Structures are given as structure tokens and as C-alpha cells.
Amino acid sequence: MTIEHSFLSRATKLIPTIAAPRDCDAPRVHGGWPMISKEVMLKDHRVTVDLNCPVARFPDNPVLTAKEVNQVWQDPGLQVTTVHNAGVALHGGDTVMLFRSHLRCGVSVLGIARSSNGVDGWRVEPRPAMTPATEGDAFAPGTDARALIENESGSVEDPRITQIGDTYYITYSAYHATVKNRVRVSLATTRDFSHFVRHGPVLQRDMRNVVIFPEPIGGRYAGLFRPNDTTGGEVGGIYAEIKLGWTSSVESNRWEIQPEPVMKTGAGPSAFSDKIGPGAPPFRTDKGWLSVFHGVRTTMDGGPYVLGVALHDLANPARVKMSSIPILFPSRADCRVEESAYTHVPQVVFTCGVVRRDDGSVLIYYSGNDTVMNVGVTHEDVLIALCESYGQDPLTGHLKYDIGGYRS
């Protein structure tokens, strides 16, 4: 069987495979434009992705919901309404999903689920892994524990995980309980996903999106940052900018943020025009660092979130090729829940984690409507081709290809 995915209708269907697979490594040409196609495996299904269908959804999405978590977290104080925005990592032969859930009281906590194949069969740990900090938690030397406890008293949210050596670095959003919209991205580390050490805020300013590159670049570590602004509706201004930061030590929380953004939207008809932010930590390919990000365009009926992709130069990640075409739009397929189940935010796809496999295929773990967790698959060659052939200027938004050339 293969999975056929329509980029326009956003529908996925299984179709029988009879003919031998074509040579998917060779670019195909349709009407004068290149078309690269890759066949990869998604569990026991052969999946085809290309420039028109860059991401194929797992047919059995969602892979984890509040229903499954509540079957394990049976204490009434731990019952949840959502499972979303999960960081992912490989550990101990499993894929580990560090997911965010809203408790019914409104506070967000982080839980852990593990899968042997990275797609389904998720096993939920019996208790949350991280809740708002208390004096009983572990703090790194020099951390102001009292200030950290106060700062994340409202919620812990949206973890991203970067493995460097045998240490997993987790950036997460820490919300104050009483100061409206006060949020700091904080750092925690673990080696076993059982014991976590908190290191405090990576910067002393409001922000929600920080991802760290998985290896040194020129002797220093790099990160992508999207600070918050004070604009109305949480769009525009620096909400539409991603900046690059450098540090000699991730655990030091001493980052030098470059003054100019490496990606900037804020104008035009782009699906990213009003808001942009790092999604999953970048991963290395032969052509550069691939980074999956999220973007928002305000409409008359809200602000749909889409997923985009950018290619950063290996030696200088400030040099960016940015696809103008989103790789995933939200659809009804992204939030399949029972009729009586809660749905948090409509028209949203959002990722905090991807896993690149040895064959170049990439599993994207994304939430639908901030409510459930889904899995999609793509291939690094398809993502790179989008960045190289259908890009936009990362600072002005001007298209790098000629739409007028498609006229009849």
C-alpha cells in the first residue's frame, strides 16, 4: 500500500501499489519546473512525498490524546484537556515525547510518553515529568531557585529538546502565575528523562520560542530566538522576527543575541506574514541545517498557524534560504476527537520536535488545534528543494521565483 496525500484538499488516502517503485532520487520535470519525489516508510506504509505534497499525515492520527493520558493520570487533579506541543528525542531505544497538557484548572504541565517505533503505541508515564517548580526540585549551582519558582508558578509549556553528547537540553516556556503575559524561556537538562535539573531563564526578557543547534559551529553553540513584543493581538513587530544567538556554554544561559534578524516577515500575502517563530530544533544535512518553524497570517476569522521550513548555512546559520511555501496547513484531519471532547484553538498546526532518520526521512511531531498530537513524514531532500527552488527573501519576503512565468 502507498499513501497518497493531496496538498490542496489536505486529504490522505491509501492506494494499492502494483508497479515497481520509480527512481525517486531523480528530479522529474513537469511543464519546465523540477519535481523531486521521495518514497519513505511510515510504520508499515510506503509514503510518497514531493514538492506538492511535502508532508504526509499518518492515517491513524492522532497518536496521543487527552483520553489516553487520563487513563493513566486518574487523579482528578491531574486530568487533562489537551496533549500538544511536544518535544521529542531518541533515548534508550525509544522515541521519547515530552508533551504539554492543560490540566482542567488551566495550568500546563509536561508529561512523557514513549514509543518503540516513534509512530504509535505510546506508553504514558504514570506522573507528570515537570510541573511548575518547587523547592523540592533540582537546581543547577548558581541558579536563583526562588526567582525561578516564582517565574514558572503559572505553567511550564512547549518544550524543545536538543541532544548534545549524552545530555538533553530542554528549553521550555515558563509562565508567571499573576503577572499577565510574563513568560521566560527556561532551560532544564536531563540524561535519563527521569531526573531534571533546572538552570533558569535563558534570557531575562519575555519570549516563548527558543531552539538550540545540536553541535558547536565554529567553536560556539547557536540558537534561534523569537522574543515577544507588546503589539496588539500578539502579532507584528518582533513577533515576525527570528534572531540568531551565540554562547560558549548552553548551561551558562549567557547568550549574545545578534541585533538583526535572520528571518523577518510582517508584510505581503505570505502565510507567515504576521508572526513567525522557531519550531523544532534544527538538524544537520549535507546542504545545511534544516529548521521547521511556525508562521501565522491574520485573517477575518482568526490566525491560522502553518509550518514552514528554512535552510541555514552549515558554517554560518545567519545565511538562510527560506521556503515561501508552507509544508503543512491545518485541516480537519489534524484534530480528530470525540464529539464531546474539548478543542482548544482552531486552525493550528504546531511543532516542537522532529526526528531525522538514517534514510533522510523526517518524522514531524505536531499538534492539531493545540489539542492532540499527530505524526507526519517528509524527506530532507524535499524540504531542501522547497528552500532552494521556491524561496522568498528571508528579510523582505520577496519571492525568489517568477509566478508570472506560469501564465498561459
Image (cartoon, rainbow, N blue to C red):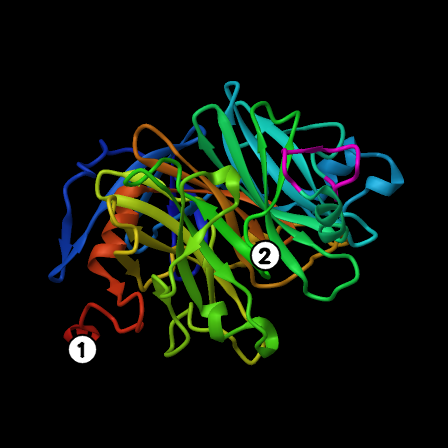
Q: Do the residues labelled 1 and 2 touch (CB within 8 Å)?
A: no
Element on which disc 1 rests: helix
Residue at horizontal 25 percent and vertical 71 percent from the top = 399
The residue under label 2 is which amino acid type? Gln
Percent x, y for residue 342?
Answer: 74, 55
Q: In which quarter of the image is the N terminus?
A: top left
Q: Give the range drawn in magenta.
A: 131-143
In the figure, 248 relative to 7: above or below?
above
Residue at mark 2: 204
Q: Residue furthest front?
A: 142
Looking at the image, residue 270 sits to the left or right of residue 373; the answer is: left
Percent x, y for residue 88?
Answer: 52, 36
Q: Residue 220 carries which label?
A: none
Percent x, y for residue 406?
Answer: 18, 72
Q: Residue furthest right?
A: 76
Q: Does the magenta stretch include residue 142?
A: yes
Residue at horizontal 38 percent and vertical 72 percent from the top = 270
Residue at mark 1: 404
Q: Residue furthest left?
A: 32
Q: Quadrant of the C terminus?
A: bottom left
